[in-house]
Amino acid sequence: MNIKNIFMLLILSSSLSYLPVAMATAGNDEHKEHAEEHHDDEHHDETASATDHKDDHGDEKEQHDDHDKNEEHHDDEHHNENTGGADHKDDHGDEKEQHDDHGNAHGDEHEEGADAHGGHGGHEEEGATKLTSAQMKIADIVVQPLMPQAISSAIKAPGEVRFNTYKTSLITPRIAAQVIDRHVVLGQVVKKGQPIVTLSSVEMAQAQGDLLVADKEWKRVKKLGRKVVSARRYTEAKINWELAKAKVKAYGMSGPQIEKLLTSKDFSRANGRFELVASIAGTVLKENYILGQQADPGEELIRITDESTLWVIANVSPAVAHEIRVGNNASVQFGKRIFPAKVAQINHSLDEITRTTGIRLLVENNDDALHPGLFVTAQIETSGQTTALAVPEAAVLRSPDGDWQIFVEQDEAGEFKGVEVELLRVSDGMAIISGVKPTTRVVVEGAFFVQSELAKSGFEIHNH
């Protein structure tokens, strides 16, 4: 064996001895690689999980950032709200300033209104209405310039409302009687002939019995006729019947009550009861009795007055009384109302206390606004003459606040505005006024239509 072969064997043996180690090493390397791969996979999974977890945290962070942004947005909104609240407060402040300015302007307006009012008359009303020529023609509206007119002078004097005794009735018994029943109460309006109170009297019972006997005899005699009975009996029967009837009537029975008694043919109705009735239509203003009371003849039980016309006693100085004549026009003012009147009487004697002359005025009181006892102011025309501004009574109307007003035409034809005036008095259908200037064009006919149109327009007179 040569050296070459020995060398080859050594190499081969070395290789064989190295093979297990290599294999082991390779196995170890393979296992190591496998472990490393497994570790790398786990690490990759962990890394992925970590990455996912990191992504989750990132999402949470993004959500948190979004939440922070939302909070910042909310804070911005809250800041804006605070800023808006401040602006709102500023707006309220501006509104308050505007309100104060409005209050000052309103106060100035009232001050100007107070200055414009000054006196009672001459106040122009707020707002106007415009009428067409067709409307004015249909409503018969007549506009004329206001010119001074010659009118009778007038005297102003205080007065007191009194009963019109010519239209007052006292209900009194004509014989002694007892009050049995009442049929009316104080303040009640009654008709003529209406029962007022029921009385009972012994004298009336006797008179009623006598009437029933006389009536029976008279009817028998009339039935027999003059050919059967003597003339004396016939005459006596008739006279007795008439006397008995007149007696019960004089005691207080009315005609209808007497007829009812005679037609009943019942002697038990002669019980002495009878009713006092109203002799006039009017209002029960006074009663002076209680049930069961024994009333004497002539004692006033009830007072009835027709208040459609009343008296006003005005006291004037004797120095001017001679200028007043019976029949002169007059007016009576109570509150804001004025009532037309006439001079009915001039007293010929002075009042012992006031040393004035009494002038009795007859006043129409159709709406029952005046009552006895009221104090009023009278305007009485005299024989003298004066000039004043006057319009037809129908041209002066009440404004919504109760004052008198007329309607004045403005610069444009057909445009009217209500103007407050003072109504001094009324004479022969003419209203004497003050508060406007002469030549002012006013509505003298159709004022009510103008007032209605003004109300439709929504304008109201300015209240004081």
Image: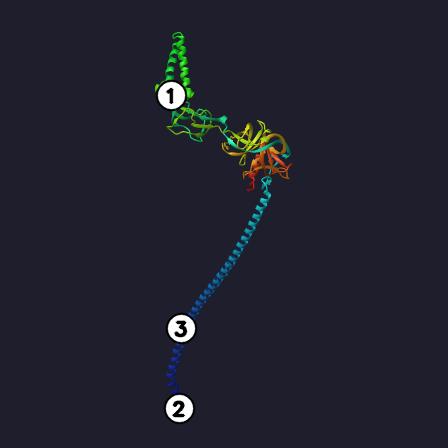
Q: Position of residue 325 (x, y in %)?
A: 58, 27
SS of the residue under disc 2: helix
Q: Closer to us: mark 3 or mark 1? A: 1
Q: CA distance from mark 3 to mark 1?
A: 146 Å
Q: Position of residue 464 (x, y in %)?
A: 55, 42
Amino acid type, residue under disc 2 in the picture: Ile
Q: Residue furthest bottom?
A: 2
Quadrant assignment for the N terminus: bottom left
Q: CA distance from mark 2 to mark 3?
A: 52 Å
Give the answer, above or below, for where 236 lies relative to 354. Answer: above
Of marks 2 and 3, which one's residue comes earlier in the chain? 2
Q: Is residue 244 visible?
A: yes
In the rendered image, which residue does mark 2 sit on? 6
In the rendered image, which residue does mark 1 sit on? 203
In the image, is 98 to the left or to the right of 2? right
- Residue shown at 49%/27% (left/top)? 165
Of marks 3 and 1, which one's residue comes earlier in the chain? 3
In the image, is 44 to the left or to the right of 314? left
In the rendered image, which residue does mark 3 sit on? 42
Of marks 1 and 2, which one's residue comes earlier in the chain? 2
